[in-house]
Image (cartoon, rainbow, N blue to C red):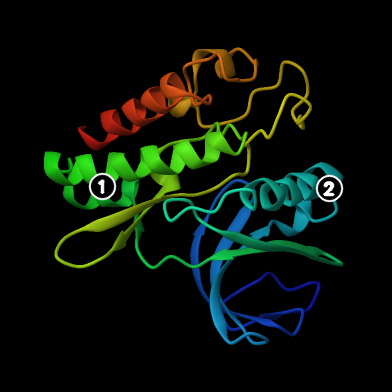
């Protein structure tokens, strides 16, 4: 893809990834459904904005997302495959999940029925268990980062995604001291004040308290 052309459906990156359609966008960039022409598979491709492609901190955050997510292998956690960098471009590839986010589901149909909500929350808790067991604090558990995959007979599999601001240990820091990252409505009190969560903190940290608090937050959104 030409260095002066913004990524769009129909374009090809590195001669390997054909962009099929735009799935969404966030503060850091865009996500596309793409075809891996080398392997003949479909992936999701998360690309940072062109104006951030030369920013060392933004590139390192994207690399870390791959490194951390690859520690976890679980059906309720989105798999991330690889990091790619070229002049003016940087992106990662991850598992393509056909479905909608929990937030989209709530906007479309309103509060989730209790029986369905219980299944979703069970899956989210299982995914967080795997993440925490791998020594990672996600820090951004919210309905927009939970994907729902149809599995027949009105049942769905919930998948936790987006490790963009996750932490992998005490020495794992990209945010400046006192800096605040995350989604305000989904933040723990310590995150709002610029402190990092850890295993002792109830919000998203490893252990039963962290799991229960993260799931409780999701439950509150589901029931709205």
Is 112 located above or below residue 75 in the figure? Answer: above
Q: Quadrant of the N terminus?
A: bottom right
- Can residue 77 be spotted in the picture? yes
**Dot 2 lies on which element?**
loop
| Residue shown at 77% from the left, 32% from the top | 174
On screen, 62 above or below 197?
below
Q: Identify which residue, 59 or 200, lies in the foreground.
A: 200
Could you say which is closer to the camera, residue 10 or residue 117?
117
First reached walking from the N terminus: tag 2 or tag 1: 2
Label 1 Cα crowd, 10 Å radius (few <14 / some 14-19 / many 20+): few
Where is residue 26? Give x, y as percent.
55, 49
Q: Report the quarter where the C terminus lies.
A: top left
Q: Pointers 2 and 1 in contact (CB under 8 A)?
A: no
Q: Going 63% across and 85% down the picture, which residue do you hit? A: 39
Left-right relation of 59 to 116:
right
- Residue under the image location 55 percent in, 31 percent down: 139
Q: Which residue corresponds to mark 1?
A: 107
Q: Image height check: is 164 above or below 197?
A: below
| Residue 56: numbered disc | none
Residue 196 rendering spot, x and y as whole percentages: 64, 20
Label 2 Cα neighbours within 10 Å, binned few <14 / some 14-19 / many ≥20: few
- Between the residue at mark 2 and the residue at mark 1, the CA separation in whole angstroms equals 35 Å
Question: Exactly how many numbered labels are in the figure?
Answer: 2
Q: Which residue is mark 2?
A: 55
Residue 160 vertical placement versus 11 (above, below): above
**Residue 71, image x and y in percent?**
64, 48
Helix, strand or loop at mark 1: helix
- Position of 93 compared to 218: left or right? right
Residue 182 falls in image quadrant: top right
């Amino acid at each position: 893809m030409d260095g002066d052309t913004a990524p769009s459906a129909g374009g090809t990156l590195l001669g390997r990834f054909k962009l099929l359609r735009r799935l969404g966008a966030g503060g850091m960039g865009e996500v596309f459904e793409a075809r891996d022409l080398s392997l003949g598979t479909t992936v999701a491709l998360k690309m940072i904005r062109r104006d951030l492609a030369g920013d060392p901190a933004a590139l390192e955050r994207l690399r870390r997302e791959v490194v951390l997510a690859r520690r976890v292998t679980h059906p309720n956690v989105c798999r991330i495959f690889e990091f790619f960098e070229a002049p003016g471009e940087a992106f990662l590839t991850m598992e393509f999940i056909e479905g909608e986010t929990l937030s989209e589901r709530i906007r479309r149909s309103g509060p989730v029925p209790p029986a369905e909500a219980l299944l979703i929350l069970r899956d989210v808790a299982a995914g967080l268990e795997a993440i925490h067991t791998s020594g990672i604090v996600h820090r951004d558990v919210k309905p927009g980062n939970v994907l729902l995959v149809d599995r027949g007979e009105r049942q769905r599999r919930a998948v936790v995604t987006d490790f963009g601001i996750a932490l992998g240990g005490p020495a794992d820091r990209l945010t400046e001291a006192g800096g605040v990252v995350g989604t305000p409505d989904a933040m723990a009190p310590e995150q709002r004040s610029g402190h990092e969560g850890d295993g002792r903190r109830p919000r998203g940290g490893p252990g039963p308290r962290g799991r229960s608090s993260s799931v409780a937050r999701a439950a509150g959104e589901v029931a709205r």
